Image: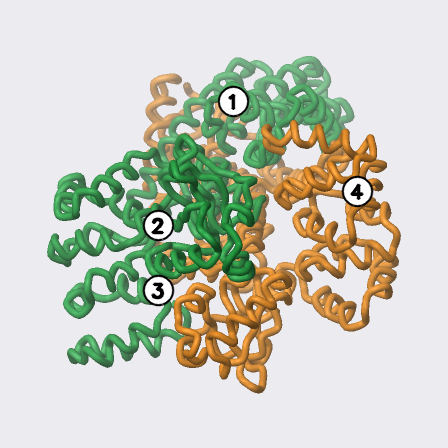
Chain colours: A green, B orange
Amino acid sequence: MRDELSDQAHHLVQYLEHGEREAFLDGFDELHGYDQAVFYVTLPSQLRHQIIEWLTPTELAAVFDEIEPEDVDLNDLLEEMSPRYAAQMLNQMYTDNSVDLLEEVEPRELAMYLALMPKTDADEIRRLLNYEDDTAGSLMGTEFVAINQNLTIGQAMTAVKRAAQEAEQITYIYVVDDEETLVGVISLRSLIVWPDEARVSDVMDTNLITVEPSDDQEDVARLMADYNFVSMPVVVENKLVGIITVDDIVDVIDEEAAEDYSRLAGVDVVTLEENPFKSATKRLPWLIGLIFLGMGTASVINTFDGLVQQASILAVFISLITGTAGNAGTQSLAVSVRRIALQETSSLLRMLLTEVLIGAMIGTTAGITIFLVVWVWKANLLLGVAVGLAMGVAILVANVAGSFIPLIMDKIGVDPAVASGPFISTLSDLTSVIIYFNIAGLFISHFVSA
Amino acid sequence: MRDELSDQAHHLVQYLEHGEREAFLDGFDELHGYDQAVFYVTLPSQLRHQIIEWLTPTELAAVFDEIEPEDVDLNDLLEEMSPRYAAQMLNQMYTDNSVDLLEEVEPRELAMYLALMPKTDADEIRRLLNYEDDTAGSLMGTEFVAINQNLTIGQAMTAVKRAAQEAEQITYIYVVDDEETLVGVISLRSLIVWPDEARVSDVMDTNLITVEPSDDQEDVARLMADYNFVSMPVVVENKLVGIITVDDIVDVIDEEAAEDYSRLAGVDVVTLEENPFKSATKRLPWLIGLIFLGMGTASVINTFDGLVQQASILAVFISLITGTAGNAGTQSLAVSVRRIALQETSSLLRMLLTEVLIGAMIGTTAGITIFLVVWVWKANLLLGVAVGLAMGVAILVANVAGSFIPLIMDKIGVDPAVASGPFISTLSDLTSVIIYFNIAGLFISHFVSA
């Protein structure tokens, strides 16, 4: 909560505690919806009971419209109300928001709330609940304004004024024909500028960009960001079934970015866990899985035990080579995953060549650097050559793997989630030690004599 | 470009090539601004010359309003126009967009374009160019609608209609007093619903949330995302100086997420590089820097050369332990950076305890796993104990480092950018080998006898 609000919040709590209804409602009403929501969820339960008593379900619905379901324990909040009150409140919220909340509710409670709503409203919510997560359908609300194309601007304006209180946004007004097919869109801005006598069909924009309920939310977000739309119509067989508003898109972009980010680190940061035990449980599967991949690396080194026995100096550079190649592989991975997110993956062959080139340049530079360092440090030219060469080749391989594994997964339609940063660097440990010991084997006689 | 557009684009190119002015203008006009921009920038230069000839600077300004400066070579695009035409066009764009473009222009060209604009417009652009990148000032435009609080709704509506063509958005209309101080806001939705005779000051919302030009763009984005605003007023000493619109915020969220992500991988993915040589040059500094940190790890192993000579089996588990601890450290780092981004970093002590707990649980589980594997594989209980114990402690240390380094940097006000994923895993290589060889040293007699 912003600093300037804490004073106000302090007063509101006092009004609640002393039962000063009018003073509370006046002060609460002055807050923005988001601040009301933050205030509401941070109160102790018995003070929320007081608010529930004082506000109608419709008034509380405006507060709940601003609650982010992932930030609260929704079942607790709803159990503080009578089932009838909760059902009425949920029904008065914008459908996209109430559906978001109801997805978090236990099946038994969900059935109860739906049973307490008017049948048509319950059916609508049930329909929206059926859309898969991460699709346009799961984001859309049904509080849009649609008018018939045969209206005049004056008639349209009257209709919009009537609908203004219910609608989630009226920046765009959608235009339908007599069969309810979506045929155009007109902005409120145009509506107030055009003369009353003009016909909607003559001034509407007919170049429509629409999405379908099954479309991926990330694609919808990209479209809305590119076209700078405040809302996007969702259609089924050219009939308007809902709209997606830009505030939901902002959340989607944030969430999708957090997902890509989680992937890179091999840990879920989309929903941050407060409980340390649960945190550990979430992080462990990746780590333990990778330990078994790491065992592969250990057994490769084990097969080269003869070399290490002859020249223990080889052990010194294992982690330098695996670490650097892992870092290079992680960089490539990050660039590839970003290109996939931005859909900049045109020609597979061209990208292969580009990454081979980058890997070769980076590998050469890093290899020469480490060659010089080892040569000077150990005063052994051939040891320097062996370590430098191994480093260069290991980086080249890690680079190509880091960019290609996610790209190929994406091309063949597998979710590239498994290609995490830790996976690539653990895989690159394996390839790096194979490369390192094979190259070192070629030079071994020179280290032993050193 | 969307598939359904390629046909249309094909026709438009033919009209351009055959000099069919009317047909081209009709077709081009039907496209959305964003599609016009995509079409324009992908054309060969001589066809763009034709468009410049056919469109007025004002008409082309609407196209350039949709161009993302990072996607194109702006200097090339502007050099195709006469300086006077380019200056007029830049001046007709929304100021936030023209300033974004002008930031990419060479200083000499910038001076020339500004000299060719009316002085007041040039001064305004100069003022906006002075705001630092990543601040509210650098995002804001000056095409807002502000009305006096003493107007009636009817008068306000007339003012809004007059301003509608110029303004970037009219969803919110800002209200000022006689001294031009911002005193309230009213939505276009309210404006059309309230009766003409009502006074603006009686119906406006006076609970204002504003930002200042020097505010961090990430904070502004967070506020707009929380409050679901379509635009945000920017004030200096309570005077309205500009507005930030939600489309800019969508870009900011995307960009900030890409920055966090880049940090995690130690590579810049905010601006993706097409040239492999430049890509390599961008990735190398991190890698080479970390090679020198990695040399620290190599020299630690070197000091334990005596141990490796006695028991070459120790070399087998180096990369398994450093790799796993690095993975755990990267996970912690990712969670911490995300908490910093979401400003969920309340109590340093509490977070320290939480991360120690998580590290202990993960370290114990991973340590026991590896103990069992090594014990069974090598039939050597004490070797298993040594490797498992080293793994557990190394993970605990990597976890605490991964979460604490960025948090402490953030608390003391240093940009935590240096705490990248590769840095943490390379640092953890160093601590891991120190831990590993010290623990192994305690058990060494048992491996030698094995």
Q: What is the number of the mark on residue B51?
A: 4
Q: What is the number of the mark on residue A33?
A: 3
Q: Secondary structure at mark 4?
A: helix
Point out residue A340 in the picture as x, y percentages from the top left corner. Answer: 56, 32
Residue at 75 percent across and 29 percent down: it is: A361
Residue at 20 percent across and 50 percent down: it is: A75
Mark 3 or mark 2: which comes first in sequence?
A: 3
Mark 1 or mark 2: which comes first in sequence?
A: 2
Q: Are marks 4 and 3 on the same chain?
A: no
Q: Are marks 1 and 2 on the same chain?
A: yes
Q: Secondary structure at mark 2?
A: loop
Q: Amino acid at mark 1?
A: Met
In the rendered image, the quadrant that contains the N terminus of chain A is: bottom left
Q: Is residue A7 left or right of residue B421?
A: left
Q: Nearer the viewer, residue B174 or A103?
A: B174
Point out residue A221 in the picture as x, y percentages from the top left corner. Answer: 49, 42
CA neighbours of label 2 inside 10 A, class few (<14), some (14 to 19), many (20+): many
In whole angstroms, how far apart are the C-alphas of marks 4 and 2?
Answer: 41 Å
Task: Say whether marks 3 and 2 touch (CB < 8 Å).
Answer: no
In whole angstroms, how far apart are the C-alphas of marks 3 and 1?
Answer: 43 Å
Question: In front: mark 4 or mark 3?
Answer: 4
Q: Amino acid at mark 3?
A: Gly
Q: Which residue is mark 1?
A: A409
Q: Are marks 3 and 2 on the same chain?
A: yes
Mark 3 or mark 1: which comes first in sequence?
A: 3
Q: Are marks 3 and 1 on the same chain?
A: yes
Q: What is the number of the mark on residue A143?
A: 2
Whether residue B361 is visible, yes or no, is yes
CA neighbours of label 1 inside 10 A, class few (<14), some (14 to 19), many (20+): some
Point out residue A182 in the picture as x, y percentages from the top left corner. Answer: 44, 39
